[in-house]
Amino acid sequence: GDKKTARSPSPECERRTHQRLQDSPRRCMMVTVKGVTLAVGCLVFFSGFVIVSAYLSGWWPGSDEGEGEGGGSRTSVSETIDDFIIREVNHDNIRNNLRHLTLKPHVAGTPAELETAKWVEETWRAQGMDEVHQVAYQVLLSYPEKDTPNLVRILNDSGAAVWTSPGRQKPLYAPEEASPDVLPDFNAYSAPGSVAGDVVYAHFGREEDFKALENLGVEVKGRIVMARYGEVFRGNIAATAEGRGAVGVLLYPDPQQFSPLGEEEVYPSTVYLPGSGVPVGTVFTHDGDPLTLLYPAVDSAYRMSESKANLPRIPIQPISYDDARHILRHMGGELVPSGWQGGLNVTYRLGPGLAETGWKVTMEVLTHNVPTTIYDVVSVIRGSEEPDRYVILGNHRDAWYLGGLDPSSSTAALLELSRVLNVLRNETGWQPRRSVVLCSWGAEEYGLVGSMEWSEQFHKQLMARTTAYLNVDMAIDGNYTLRAQSTPLLYHLLFEAAAKEWVRATRRENFVASKHTRLWSKRFRDEDIDVLSDVAILGSGSDYKAFQHNLGVPSLDVRYTHGPGLYTQPLYHTLYETFAAADELYDRGFNFQAAVTQMWAVMAVNLADAQLLPFSLVEYGDFVTVAFDQLVEHYGDLISSRNITLDYFCAAVTEFSQAARNFTNNIININSTNPLAVRRVNDQMMMVERAMIDPHGLPGRPDYNHVVMVPSISNIYASTAFAGLTDALDGITDLDPEQQEERWDQFSQHLAAVTYYVTTAGKVLSDDLWKNSYLFVCQRHSPVDVRDQF
């Protein structure tokens, strides 16, 4: 996000602070929406909001929480419950779980992956979960030929191969790397085929990179595009290249990002990627089963033909940076623009083609699609008072190879979390007020398939009854600090849990962190602000997608992550993401994985037990306000040039923000002894996120429904505020007049829809069924004024 100047808390900040529901020093929210970063600063303490927070948590005098047995008591015993969880989480159990899960590859749809599903099911039954079930779906997955790897070659002018890629990653350290079940390198859902042609180097394969090539006179059509991993989702790279007429795509990890200390300082000595490493993954740009989009892949489902499915039509293949070096060494054409040179010791050129006359690159890709069965495993601890309200926790189980970090670190954590909750029940008599549902998803790596199919099958129940969804895609991808992505509604839950005293995690340089928030604020910091903890909003790329973006269920995802000096998790989706990497390099002693387990469990119990849901309504209003102002900052002049008014939209934002404040101020007046009154208030708060859901979907994107927090159309890993509006405006002036008119019509229609749904989000916090909308005066702040508030 943009750097901000440190300022004293303004009166507006103090006013908002007073209304925040939090029983610890206030951290006002700052939003950088295009990022989107939500920062926590302005330490202020107000007794007023301590009272409200206490009331929400159910331990303020007058609340009926804690009376009698069960019911999720959150009296002073609440601290005992949290302490119990923190003490009970066992590092060795997590380590043993992870070791079991990483003994052999378990790609979705394979017998090995079914074995892991059965093991999770058996573990949950043995722990004493109230219900445990496997849920199967018939879906379309994709695999390479096990004994005939996909190959890339350089052919000379006589057609002889002067170099051929190995097609597999070389075992380096852990014995299981040499497992006969390891598949050759591939990109799932690539089209099969053999192509030959000139190569064009496209940097990171972003839309702006392809535009730069076009401006430089480098034609992509009919050629093979080679691009670097790292800036956007691999499927977006492939789709953009295909849309511009490329006949094939090669994707590789450049050592500039993946091995910055040099090619000798790599796995197994460090966490950096060796030259033989190949990050694999799906290139399908949608989520769920490709043949039953928007509907569950059950036996009765209609399945379209593959020819009609939105699947890639060209071969796509990942290669290592050792492989890329061979191609780049022979590249012809002009030198790359400034900033496009990578970390290989060769001169990077654009192409098209190789320097030697008549030489070509060929791709022979045998990846093919296969109907197969995947399995989710679902277990339940039934609630004692509101069993029809669900707190859902989930992570996926399938891995491209051994899954030492992604996803098995989180599966190991989830199994320990479930053990701890069952021990809590058995030893203390605790029973959650609401039902706790644990989900182990299948086939996430192919495009969130297991969670999408389950959410589509049980759409109505989940949308009506789910309180929140807490995801941990991987417990760790580093050991530097906590990383969180969240809807604003769960900020209070997130920061309250992060402020607990956790296991002391001693790092190699003897840095000790006893509180997540202390380390988080210290390490995810804007240089110009004293205290700043970053929370990104949810893009796609993990199993929260269906819940947040389709159902309107408040969601979050947490993990321990790497520092700013590390571009990415370098071993991600490679053969070298092993148990040894987790055990010997990332988390000796399993301190960080234990800390994430503790935090995950505490958040789940807090949500399941609280009489009134600990939702952050005011912060949501602040988020939407700042998002609107930044939309005006970036696009206001362009929109005004078309005589399109934003006044109705601004009034809707103002009304929602004010409704959130009013509701928060009045919630303390609730009769907490009346279960129907409590249920009514909770239902209203649950409706807020649902109110942002457009059942028709975003323009041209029926598989995304949330009008506020939306993954970018050019990079589904990232998320932006009001992306349905910004996507329509991005690049609009570069289009021809007819295309511009179509875009403006799309923008205007979606502007009306967004205005309506934001207004509705305010209405659900009241009993208003008659007042005309947009009666609020548009209280527009300049973008600078909004930032000054923090």
Image (spheres, rainbow, N blue to C red):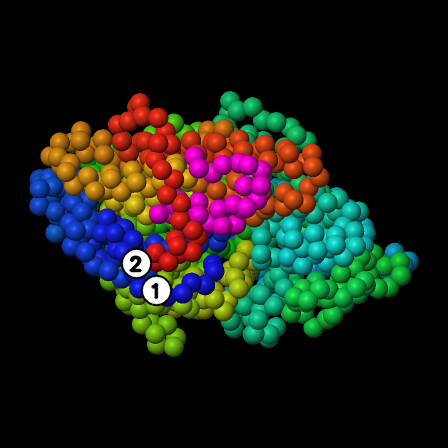
Label 2 Cα neighbours within 10 Å, binned few <14 / some 14-19 / many ≥20 = few
- Which mark identifies residue 617? none
Q: Amino acid under label 1?
A: Arg
- As helix, strand or loop, the secondary structure at mark 2 comes to loop
Asked where in the image residue 95 lies, by quadrant, the reply is bottom left
Residue 686 image position (x, y, % from top left): 31, 36
Q: Is residue 547 toward the left or the right of residue 349 in the image?
A: left
Residue 219 image position (x, y, % from top left): 79, 51
Residue at 50%, 67% (x, y): give it: 566
Label 1 Cα neighbours within 10 Å, binned few <14 / some 14-19 / many ≥20 = some
Residue at 75%, 44% (x, y): give it: 245
Q: In the rendered image, which residue does mark 2 sit on?
A: 10
The magenta stretch is 622-648
Residue at 52%, 62% (x, y): give it: 568
Asked where in the image residue 40 lies, by quadrant, the reply is bottom left
Magenta run includes residue 640: yes
Q: Is residue 38 visible?
A: no
Q: CA distance from mark 1 to mark 2?
A: 8 Å
Magenta run includes residue 194: no
Q: Is residue 397 toward the left or the right of residue 433 in the image?
A: right
Q: Amino acid under label 2?
A: Ser
Q: Establish if 166 lies above or below 544.
A: below
Q: In the rendered image, which residue does mark 1 sit on?
A: 7
Q: Is residue 588 visible?
A: yes
Residue 418 image position (x, y, % from top left): 30, 47
What main secondary structure does the magenta stretch of the protein show? helix
Q: Are marks 1 and 2 in contact (CB under 8 Å)?
A: yes
Residue 469 image position (x, y, % from top left): 36, 42
- Quadrant of the rendering where the C terminus is positioned: bottom left
581 vs 148, nearest the viewer: 581
627 vs 189, nearest the viewer: 627
